[in-house]
Amino acid sequence: MNYLVSAATDVGLVKDVNQDSFGVKILDTKLGTILVAVLCDGMGGYSSGEIASATVVDAFNKWMINRLPILCETGISDQVIKSEWGRLVQKCNDKIKKYGELHNISLGTTLTAIMLTETRWFIVNVGDSRVYSIHDQVKVLTKDQTVVAQEVELGKLTEEQAKTDPRRSVLLQCIGVSGVVMPDHFTGTLTKDTVYMLCSDGFRHEISNEEMMQYLRPDVMTNENQMKDNMDELVELNKSRKEKDNITVISIRTY
């Protein structure tokens, strides 16, 4: 599989620091070309959220360089990736908590990461950053670990009510604050001519799925410059609608 990759990030209208961090790496292996993209949203209510988010992105980058080639020698399975990433998330959680205790501060981060192999995708998620697939429809591949998402699942809120609920950004857990982190894991079949999009919650609050489809569908994401322009337009659209959070988005188009 081949990939076009582009990203956009913005500090937004209110905050002084962009607490989002992200990274994308592509590696040629004996199993073919493998891509890993990571996006972390440092917790807005906590000081030094950018340190927490960068710590997790760096850990996944090092995992891809140091561990992934070894795993490719024996083959990659759903259970192996779930186990590897689960341990990595807990290690990051412990490291960030210790940093916070040492400096007498509270800090934390969400995580969403995707690995694309020649045939499959693997996702790990903590918090409310998301992964979407965009082909003939916009589909959310992750599940928000938030109070309102839980309320919707329990039938106590509708999807429309959840969009404006004042608790919409209240997380059930995040890395660096929770004692033990329980990531969600998702897998699926990789498809050609599809856009896989990762974003922090600041990117999606003020735009609709129809607008995502308009700007990010595969037939308008034909080269990396165009991809960047399209994402920048959505970032500016968010800001024009008074989105207050940091805004980050990564798009990967398969071909």
Image (cartoon, rainbow, N blue to C red):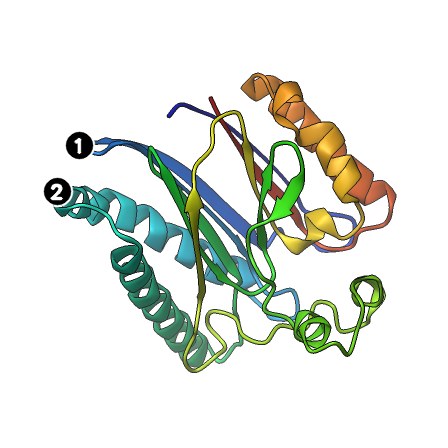
The residue that appears at 28% across and 49% down in the rendered structure is 62
- For numbered disc 2, what is the local secondary structure? helix
Please, what secondary structure does the residue beneath circle 1 have? loop
Question: Could you tell me if the residues under marks 1 and 2 are in contact, i.e. CB atoms within 8 Å?
Answer: yes
Q: Closer to the N terminus: mark 1 or mark 2? A: 1
Label disc, if present, on residue 225 of the rendered structure: none
Q: At which x and y percent is residue 238?
A: 79, 43
Mark 1 to mark 2 CA distance (whole Å): 7 Å
Residue 106 image offset from top left, x and y in percent: 53, 76
Badge 1: how crowded within 10 Å, few (<14), some, or many (20+)?
Answer: few
Residue 77: x percent and y percent?
A: 26, 52
Estimate how packed mark 2 is, as few (under 14), some (14 to 19) or many (20 or more) residues with alpha carbons within 10 Å.
Answer: few
Q: Residue 87: horizontal and vertical position, in percent?
A: 29, 67
Q: Which residue position holds label 1? A: 30
Identified at 33% across, 46% down, the residue is 61
Q: Quadrant of residue 230?
A: top right
Residue type (three-letter) at the residue carrying disc 2? Glu
Q: Is residue 176 above or below residue 140?
A: below
Q: Which residue is mark 2?
A: 73
